[in-house]
Image (spheres, rainbow, N blue to C red):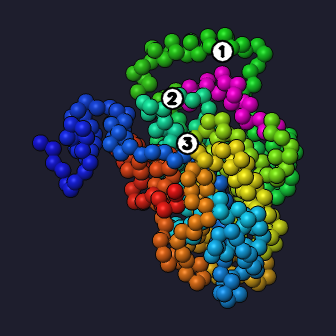
Amino acid sequence: MLSILGSSPRTCDGVGRRELLQAGGAGLLGMSLPKLLAAEALQTPITARAKSVLFVFLYGGPSQLETFDMKPAAPSSIRGPFRPIAARTPGLRICEHLPRLAERSDKYAVVRSVNHPQNDHNGTHFIQTGHTIPPAERGAAKVAATEKDWPAFGSVISYLDAHSERKTASQFPPYVYLPRLLGHFAGYDINGQYAGWLGKAWDPMATAIQKRHATDNPYFRDCTDDELDFRLAGLDPLPAVTMDRLNRRQSLLQQFDAQRRSFEQSARVRNFSTRREHAMKLLTSGDVSQAFDLRREPDALRDRYGRNLFGQSLLMGRRLIEAGSRFVTVAWDMAVRGDDTTSWDSHRDLTRVMKDHLLPGLDRGLPALLDDMHDSGLLDETLVFVAGEMGRTPKFINRGAADGRDHWSYCFPCLFAGAGTRGGTIYGQSDKHAAYPVTHPVSPGDLAATIYESLGIAPDLRIPNALGQPVPLVESGQPLRNLFV
């Protein structure tokens, strides 16, 4: 007889959810894991607010005190070099170098109390998965991704869509990373962006924009169309390879597969087969190659976003969401290895770099994205999430070349827009130095639960880990439902 600890929702035939999981996991009901996931999902029906998510990732850790949580009454050693200006949202202190975002604060909600204990760049794992980074060998820079990592939001969503009996198959890549995988400009391969133990089949599809030279920073300058070629390599068919010939090759591969079924039970081969299937869909879909062609957008619209890499990547992100991607990450990344002045990692030269590049670039690209998606109606069905992996120290260092702030993960802001977000909302309050939350502290688990629930996915839904054991998508966290209508 199955035992229950505490209470749980009941299925139609009176079997509890926990009983179902225990029985399915033990094989007592002869239930496969995909069927177990489907059965569990039926127990917690959630109405989706969003069809997709666009994550704007400001890598490095934007300073809360120079963006959305300014403290003008604090001492100069805390408040920093910039003044606040009025926003449409009462009580929102926003930086003077973000005037367009101040004018549009009624279109987004500001959360000022995000916090986690990972006070370094490995917060990239927290902010992209909702989970603590697991112990692993991470190379000399101590940030490298491993197969032990938790799967990213986009990977989980891709996996669940593929195993859902209610989700129709799409030819379009479900999870895309723009303009490159995180860290690749600077020679790093940073954790949090991949499928981890879920398997490489669910890694993101990524474009590979190049730089002019090793010290080039395309986020800080206008780029030519040749540089902004987001089109995926290999999607244009060779003249000698007709569609019939491509189909015959696929048929031959299927015949080989039929002779190796036992071999294909290994996870590595299953992942390879899934990746090959994705590649075939890309090769046979003209819509995919067109969606990655930024030249199809009007010049005037491209100008509004800004011709720099960040602005054009945002526009590309909107195109991919419109074409059918479920989760798109647009990363403002570190462009030059070892040079923290090329990203939001503002240890030094903060005043100049933020005033001349970071804040103006954000204030041009992000408002253009919100306006564009609002005008097209896409914002109604897309959750836009804007965040870095941490904030900066309340103490402002202003001596010599330092002029900056160090890592601070104990209180920092993020933004939500679209998909029923209550525009003009401020959630959570920090102390007088923007150092710690005073009200409504928000964890990465809370952010994860909010993202999943917005897509109609129960945060406590279970997926198989590396050992095939069902584990919840969110171990500790609650959706921020007050942010939505």
Q: Secondary structure at mark 3?
A: loop
Can the viewer see residue 442? yes
Q: In the rendered view, would you say 241 is above or below 80?
A: above
Residue linked to disc 3: 51
For marks 2 and 1 on the same chain, the one whose residue lies earlier in the sequence:
2
What range is drawn magenta here? 274-295
Residue linked to disc 1: 246
101 displayed left or right of 383: right
Question: Looking at this rendering, what residue extends furthest in the left direction?
Answer: 1
- For image coordinates 65% across by 69% down, the residue present is 89
Residue linked to disc 2: 168
The residues bearing labels 2 and 1 have C-alpha atoms spaced at a distance of 24 Å
Q: In the rendered view, would you say 113 is above or below 446?
A: below
Q: What is the number of callouts on the image?
A: 3
Q: Secondary structure at mark 2?
A: loop
In this rendering, the label closer to the viewer, 2 or 1: 2
- For image coordinates 70% across by 70% down, the residue present is 87
What's the amino acid at mark 1? Answer: Leu
